[in-house]
Image (cartoon, rainbow, N blue to C red):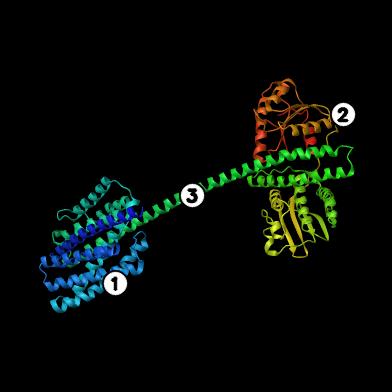
């Protein structure tokens, strides 16, 4: 690959040398022809700019070659038009020094080839080359005046203008034509390029022809079209075409219309100004269009990168969700067996006190693991926006007391005191999600217990009326380690509370992050006030409206509550046994099925009061079985179906509802939750 690149660069350098040499020789003879006109001096001198461009872009050896071509043909052209040897040597020396000065300035200011890609770069070139043309004229004019009797001021002006115009127009033109980016930016067919440039030449000839009455400003729109379609290269080539056509015609006196109005000198100045204005107008337009095109391509590229990044983020989210689903399912399935049998053992009367204590420890450890899994699932719900609040008339004071009583054994087992302070003057119920509110309180109390080794934990509730209802402020205070001010901002981020508190985490580190998400979902705010070494006060505030409790339904007789036939479906024998046993203990008649197809067959024959359905089963999974049962006629397809599965992510639960299930019980199954949902849906036909 490096050899191929080197070979390509050698070919490019050779082509540049050939092209610049031809252009340089042509420019010399064209300019010398202009000296034979009425003005007697070249009104346009491109050779110095071409030599300077070659010195900038060529390798050292090729620079010497181009310089030799310049000197040789410069001398030859001067001698051929009748200049003396002294004049030829003077002109060649001054022009060579001028080109070398431009080369030195370009290297000094840019360090490499100037890139004419912006308005700033376009303006910078004449800004640095015009003083060089003035210095060149200042050196040459006195010599010509002293030794060849030329008028000093006129010679200085003529020399300066022909040099400044050549450098200001031809140097940017050469650099634009050499720059590969300008070639790549506008991929126009050769046919269209030829048509556009031919149109520029034709209109220029029409406007410059002695017998034509066409005004010169007609050249501008055609040249601008070339600049629009071909970019900076089109603007440069159009300006060169105009200069090569108008200068010889105007300077030779072939246009009596101009000569009648302007003298030779004024006419030369007018043509020089016209060419400069045309060139910079077209170049400015083309560069602005090119800049807009670059910005458009950059925007498209950034949009593409954004789409790629979004796709990658979605893929990462999907992979994370799939991992969470797999992890949750694989842990919950065996954990359901462990906790299920622990609950069954705890109901036995023949256990010794020590054995009962061990069973309770198993149940507590399993419950802790379930808490970790639930935290992860809650965080997943937060990220996917699936937190739904179930607002019910709730006594915040009673909820605080119940939660504190629930946590009291754990708090006192650590040797800590527990205080509960409630300021509730009106004793009203409010529209609250009791389960979510309890979850926040338990998380904050667990956090206080974990990081408090001695002293006390206080729970406070203050309710005061505000314009939108009542403000409920909950505070959990402890005498624990405290938190430094700079670390408090990290507390409600994932897995950061334990780090901020300087302890090794005992859980997933998600509790406080979930608390913040839940409080935000409830429209409240949460924070912490803490002093290192003295303790912390975690607080959150909610605004809730008062809500009256709905009348309670008439109690159902116990005999009726324990009546009904239930179908339990699970391919895992242990989990099937646990669920069937729990239902039998509650007084239900239980049938069992080990697959989805068996469940459909049993449901086809028996109108069950309720069906507990696992999700992952061979041959026919729980979703397929649910759809098949729903398709059964009459009461056979109307039985409420509750998912009883280790699939607990929000998207997985949604699929259960979409298939026709009425509720979802995550594994490991808690006996109280199971009984509550079964009683809720028993004998209630599916919608």
Crowdedness near tag 2: few (<14), some (14–19) or many (≥20) residues, C-alpha within 10 Å: few
Camera-nearest residue between 548 and 177: 177
Q: How far across and how far down the image is residue 113, in percent? A: 33, 63
Counting from the top left corner in percent of width and height, residue 423 is at 83, 55
What is the spatial separation of the Cα atoms under label 2 and label 1, in whole angstroms?
110 Å
Q: Vertical placement of 42 versus 370: above or below? A: below
Distance, label 1 to label 3, CA atoms, is 46 Å
Q: Which residue is mark 2?
A: 559
In the figure, is residue 147 to the left or right of 670?
left
| Residue 205 drawn above or below residue 354 | below
Earlier-in-chain disc, 3 versus 2: 3
Question: Gap in Å between the C-alphas at discs 3 and 2?
Answer: 66 Å
Q: Quadrant of the C terminus?
A: top right
Q: Nearer the viewer, residue 409 or 523?
A: 409
Horizontal and vertical percent position of residue 265: 18, 67
* Spot occupied by residue 682 in the image (x, y as percentages of width and height): 78, 30
Residue nearer the viewer, 181 or 290: 181
Q: Regarding mark 3 in the picture, which secondary structure is present there?
A: helix
**Classed neighbour count for the residue bearing mark 1: other residues with Cα under 10 Å, few (<14), some (14–19), many (≥20):** some
> Is residue 430 visible in the rendered structure shown here?
no
């Amino acid at each position: 690959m490096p050899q191929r690149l080197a070979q390509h660069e050698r070919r490019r350098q050779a082509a540049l040398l050939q092209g610049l040499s031809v252009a340089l020789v042509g420019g010399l003879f064209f300019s010398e022809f202009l000296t034979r006109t009425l003005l007697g001096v070249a009104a346009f001198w491109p050779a110095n700019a071409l030599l300077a461009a070659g010195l900038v872009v060529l390798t050292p050896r090729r620079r010497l070659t181009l310089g030799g071509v310049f000197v040789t043909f410069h001398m030859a052209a001067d001698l051929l038009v009748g200049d003396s040897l002294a004049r030829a040597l003077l002109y060649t020396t001054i022009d060579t020094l001028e080109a070398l000065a431009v080369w030195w300035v370009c290297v000094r200011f840019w360090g490499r080839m100037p890139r004419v890609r912006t308005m700033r770069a376009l303006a910078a070139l004449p800004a640095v080359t015009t003083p060089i043309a003035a210095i060149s004229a200042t050196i040459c004019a006195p010599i010509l005046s002293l030794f060849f009797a030329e008028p000093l001021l006129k010679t200085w002006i003529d020399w300066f203008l022909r040099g400044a115009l050549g450098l200001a127009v031809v140097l940017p033109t050469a650099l634009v034509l050499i720059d590969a980016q300008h070639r790549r930016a506008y991929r126009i067919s050769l046919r269209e390029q030829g048509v556009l440039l031919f149109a520029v030449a034709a209109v220029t000839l029409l406007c410059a022809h002695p017998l034509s009455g066409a005004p010169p400003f007609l050249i501008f729109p055609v040249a601008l079209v070339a600049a629009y379609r071909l970019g900076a290269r089109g603007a440069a080539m159009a300006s060169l075409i105009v200069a090569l056509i108008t200068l010889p015609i105007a300077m030779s006196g072939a246009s009596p219309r101009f000569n009648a109005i302007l003298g030779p000198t004024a006419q030369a100045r007018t043509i020089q100004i016209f060419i400069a204005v045309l060139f910079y107008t077209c170049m400015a337009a083309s560069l602005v269009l090119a800049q807009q095109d670059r910005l458009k391509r950059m925007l498209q590229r950034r949009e593409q990168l954004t789409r790629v990044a979004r796709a990658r983020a979605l893929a990462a989210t999907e992979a994370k969700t799939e991992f969470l689903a797999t992890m949750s399912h694989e842990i919950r399935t065996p954990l359901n067996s462990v906790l299920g049998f622990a609950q069954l053992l705890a109901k036995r009367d023949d256990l010794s006190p020590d054995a009962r204590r061990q069973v309770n420890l198993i149940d507590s450890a399993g419950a802790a693991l379930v808490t970790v899994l639930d935290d992860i699932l809650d965080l997943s719900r937060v990220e996917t926006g699936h937190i739904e609040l179930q607002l019910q008339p709730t006594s915040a004071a009673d909820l605080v007391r119940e939660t504190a009583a629930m946590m009291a054994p754990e708090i006192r087992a650590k040797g800590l005191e527990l205080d509960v302070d409630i300021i509730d003057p009106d004793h009203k119920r409010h529209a609250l999600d009791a389960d979510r509110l309890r979850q926040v309180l338990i998380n904050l109390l667990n956090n206080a217990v974990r990081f408090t080794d001695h002293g006390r934990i206080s729970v406070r509730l203050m309710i005061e009326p505000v314009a939108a209802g009542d403000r409920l402020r909950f505070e959990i205070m402890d005498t624990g380690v405290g938190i430094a001010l700079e670390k408090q901002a990290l507390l409600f981020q994932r897995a950061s509370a334990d780090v901020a508190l300087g302890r090794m985490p005992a859980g997933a580190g998600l509790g406080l992050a979930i608390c913040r998400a839940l409080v935000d979902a409830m429209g409240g705010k949460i924070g912490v006030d803490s002093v290192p070494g003295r303790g912390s006060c975690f607080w959150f505030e909610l605004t809730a409206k008062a809500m009256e409790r709905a009348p309670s339904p008439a109690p159902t007789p116990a005999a009726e509550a324990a009546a009904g036939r239930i179908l339990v479906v699970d391919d895992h024998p242990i989990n099937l046994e646990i669920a069937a046993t729990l239902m039998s203990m509650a007084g239900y008649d239980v049938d069992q099925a080990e697959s989805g197809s068996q469940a459909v067959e049993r449901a086809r024959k028996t109108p069950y009061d309720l069906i507990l359905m696992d999700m992952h089963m061979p041959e026919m999974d729980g979703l397929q079985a649910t759809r098949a049962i729903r398709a059964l006629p009459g009461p056979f397809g109307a039985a409420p179906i509750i998912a009883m599965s280790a699939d607990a992510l929000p998207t997985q639960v949604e699929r259960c509802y979409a298939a026709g299930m009425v509720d979802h019980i995550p594994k490991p199954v808690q006996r109280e939750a199971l009984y509550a949902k079964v009683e809720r849906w028993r004998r209630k036909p599916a919608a």
